[in-house]
Each structure stands twice: as C-alpha cells, then as structure tokens.
Amino acid sequence: MAGRFGEFPARWGQGLQDLQDQFTRITRSPFGPSEEEVRANLAGEASADAAIALHDAELALRDDDDTPIPAVPRDLTAAAFFDVDNTMVQGASIVHFARGLAARKYFKTSDLVDMAWKQVKFRVTGKESHSDMASGKEKALSFIAGRPTAELAALGEEIYDEIIADKIWPGTRALAQMHLDAGQQVWLVTATPVELAQVIAKRLGLTGALGTVAESEDGVFTGRLVGDILHGLGKAHAVRTLAIREGLNLKRCTAYSDSHNDVPMLSLVGTAVAINPDADLREVAKNRGWEIRDFRTGRKAAKVGVPTAIALGAAGGAAAAVLSRKREAKAS
C-alpha cells in the first residue's frame, strides 16, 4: 500500500502472502478453525501490520517537522483501544464518510440512503445482518477498486473536517486524553478502512488506528479485502497481534466499545469499559462488573466496577475525566 503515509515495508507483501498461504492450508483441514475464524485472523494480522506501518510513517513525518512535541513519561506496557462508531464518534463513521463522498458525486445518494438504513436496522436490533454486511462490502470494494490509496486518505482528511470533527463524543475524547497524559498508546479499532481510521486517529492526536485493510498494489486498490472486514473476532486478533508486536501487557490495557459484537476485544484486556452500550453489552457489563459510561444524555454515567482513572493510577488523566464530567453536568 502507498499514499501520503508512505510505502508499507517490504515485509508487508511477504507477510500477506504467508498469511494467505496459511489461510489456504488451514481451510483444507476438517479439524481446523472455521473459514470465518481464519478470515478474522487474517484481517487482524493485516490490520496490525498496516497500523504499525502507518504509525511509523507518521512518526517519520513528525521527525521532519521542527515543531516541539511535549515530553510525556512513557508507559511502555499499557495502552487503550477505542472502538469508533457510537463510542468515539456519534453515529457510524463510514456513513459520515459516505455523505462526504456522495456530496462529491463519487456515488449515488440512493447508495447512501441504503447504507444509512442498514445502520438504523443495526442500531434498533443490535445485530448485524450477514447479507447487509456482504452487500455493503461489495459496494465499498467496487467504489475503491482502481483508485489510489492516497486519494482515499486525502478525501478522508477533507470529510473529517467537514462532518466528523463535530461528532466526536467529548466524554470519550477526554478518556482517550487521560491515557495519553499517562504516557500510554491509544489506538482506534474499527471496521472502517484503515486509511480513514488513521485520519480520525491523527486528527485526535492518538497513536494510530486498527481498521479494515483493502488490498492494494503499487498504491492502487485492487478491489479485494485482506481477510475480511475487521469485526468481532477480527478486532480481538488485531489487538492481540499489536500487543505482541508492541510489547504490551494486555492485563494493563483498557478497551472501550458500545457494541456487544466487541465483547471478544473487551474480554482480552484487564479493564473493559462499555461506552454508550447497546442493551446486550450493558447486560454483559453488569454481569462482569465492567464500568459503564453513557454520554448520550446529560445524566451522570452509571458506573459499575473499578473506575478507569483509578485503575490506571494516572493523576493527570483523572483530572481530565473529572473536568469532562463537570462540563457535561453544566451542559445538562
């Protein structure tokens, strides 16, 4: 893959081929994991590779910039992982990006309406339809096929500024800042294409993003995914893979999400937090003693289990979280 973030390292191409070979071998075995599980693992591996490559490229760009970066003592073994849709961003980020693309005549408004309707169904039922996901994936891949990866990243920058910047949940943003102030890495984890997820992470000053990886050759999208959409088990595998490569202790990490579909990811870490949870996740959180925060209304968030700030032991982060709650209380 190529683009404004630079070329992926050479190991990316070989690593992708190794993963695809592994996928072929495993799916031939009647005693191995299911095809869905293998695709999820492949998506997770690809996402971690892409996230690290984009992060390294971003650091290289910063090294060329003379702007001083405030020194924060680094906590090398702890990190935070944030889901994006309805956790960090109000609504579905891919729908917001689609709005911007429709305004630029990249595809029909009817496609946007169809995508929005599927999101409404998901929010009402709390369950994702396999047929909806398949058709959505097909449309998205047909849109990007043959386009430069740099074009998607550039459009993402524009659309973020126009639409998404005003849809960031202040409470969730304060939680992310709390981890940054504690010297921890902060990663987004989302089904949104990694190029677009990276734009959100960069704009928020986060470490980087784990997202769905679309295959590309010579900086141009082929119209195929690497593995599958980063979702469910794929997210968990991406987080686990990134943790191994970054030397993180998952017991010291924190994960945030609104969706029951992300229980695999939430279950990986030492501290799980349900943000604006759907009904199923709220029930799981209560049963497991996970913290619950709801920023959708002015009421004080219900808290179950040990508060995140205390668990982190980060005084600066706690102050940020308290300040955020005071602002929300004034607004209510």
Image (cartoon, rainbow, N blue to C red):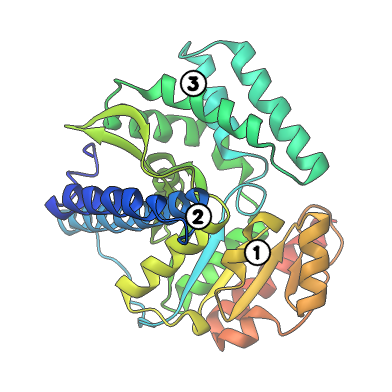
Q: Quadrant of residue 130?
A: top right
Disc 3 and disc 1: Cα gap in Å?
31 Å
Closer mark to the observer between disc 3 and disc 2:
2
The amino acid beneath tag 1 is Val
At label 1, counting other C-alpha atoms closer than 10 Å, the crowd grade (few under 14, some 14-19, many 20 or more) is: many
| Residue that mark 2 sits on | 37
Residue 210 visible to the viewer: no
Residue corresponding to mark 3? 101
The quadrant the C terminus occupies is: bottom right
Percent x, y for residue 211?
Answer: 44, 48
* Residue, disc 1: 263
Q: CA distance from mark 3 to mark 2?
A: 32 Å
Q: What is the crowding at mark 3: few (fewer than 14 residues within 10 Å), some, or many (at least 20)? A: some
- Say which amino acid is labelled 3: Leu
Q: Residue at x 64, y 87 (%)?
A: 310
> In the rendered image, which quarter is residue 316 located in?
bottom right
- Disc 3 element: helix
